[in-house]
Image (cartoon, helix red, strand yellow):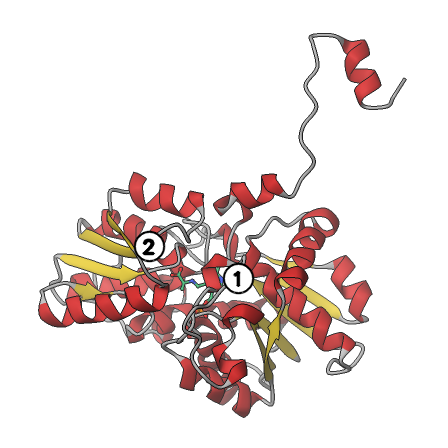
Amino acid sequence: ARAWRGLIEEYRDRLPVTEETPVVTLLEGGTPLVPARRVSALTGCEVHLKVEGLNPTGSFKDRGMTMAISKAVEEGAKAVICASTGNTSASAAAYAVRAGLTCAVLVPRGKIAMGKLAQALVHGARLLQVEGSFDDCLEMTRKLSDSYPIALVNSVNPFRLQGQKTAAFEIVDALGDAPDIHCIPVGNAGNISAYWMGYTEYAADGVATKTPQMFGFQASGAAPIVNGAPVTHPHTIATAIRIGNPASWKLAEAARDESGGVIQAVTDRQIAAAYKLLAQEEGVFVELASAASVAGLLQAHEQGLVEPGQRIVCTVTGNGLKDPDWAISGAPAPITIPIDAHAAASALELA
Ligand code: F0G
């Protein structure tokens, strides 16, 4: 076995890079595909979790960012900018440091998880909190990158999706073929589009014999694709996918339709239940938005959309440590005791 070299080196022949491209990497990708015993039992299927929270900055965004930042450097950029619900900004900030670029990020004030804010700040990004939504932030960053010499690294940057498609490659490489169904949260809709690119590319080249049905899940208070219209005031506890007008809307619909899949809404209650199930029955700590994939699978199973015995992958997109506030608020308060083993024994109900 040799060490993982980061996804650009691992999949160089399938990415738009040349020998001249300066590879900016934190050795992202190569994340584990973890069998989900409880979710498998609940659905009668073989379910795996693609644990993207184990990327360098704790989310799948690093896959897109290694490409976007490498290409920005190749094209001579000195500064990059993004709008974010938190994870993109954390990733952009880290990769900008790696590349020696200045990084500016626009986030919706009060609507991003604490860990993500900490990451952007600790990596020295110029962080602006906008009194508006993610969609407002994205519109502003598009204008700024049009008017000033600053490269946009949101997923409207095509290199982002190129990097992110490698997650589908890794899944096929690990399973020996594509799964039957792939479940994934949908926010700005880049990731579902990227996976579909990856799966179709592998199938076209005969690396996989088939492509999966793509099952995308939005939060019910932020479900523009499901509703068929933008949502002006999106709301959900899953702040990462609190998006009312996704940039890759059309690509996501194409992924759904070409794959024979669905894009559905799941409620905050379902998301919170799946978050808890993953933490307490699978031992996998994800952030709320990530749990939408599993919440959605359970819903689709109840609706009869999932044949028993199917092989299914759920992408869990971000690490639970990103949002300690939510984790703590939903858990019982810890008990405080003196330095006394008897007190510990009685608190633990051992005695
Ligand atoms: N899960 C997490 C943890 C995310 O951070 C995001 C998007 C998604 C799912 C949805 O992916 O946008 O490609 O459909 N986060 C972006 C951000 C918007 O700014 O970090 P998508």
Q: Is residue 260 above or below residue 216?
A: below
Q: Is mark 2 within 8 Å of ligand 1?
A: yes
Dot 1 amino acid type: Thr
- Which label is found at residue 25? none
Q: Is residue 65 above or below residue 247?
A: above
Q: List x then y, in percent, for residue 15.
A: 34, 73
Name the residue located 86 percent from the left edge and 23 percent from the top edge: 349
Q: Which residue is mark 2?
A: 89
Q: List x then y, in percent, for residue 197.
A: 44, 81
Which of 273 and 132 lies nearest the eye of the viewer? Answer: 132
Name the residue located 33 percent from the left edge and 61 percent from the top edge: 132
Q: List x then y, in percent, for residue 225.
A: 49, 81
Residue 249: quarter of image:
bottom left
In the picture, measured across the screen, residue 76 lies left or right of residue 195, that is left
Q: List x then y, in percent, for residue 259.
A: 56, 88
Name the residue located 77 percent from the left edge and 10 percent from the top edge: 341
Q: Which residue is mark 1?
A: 236
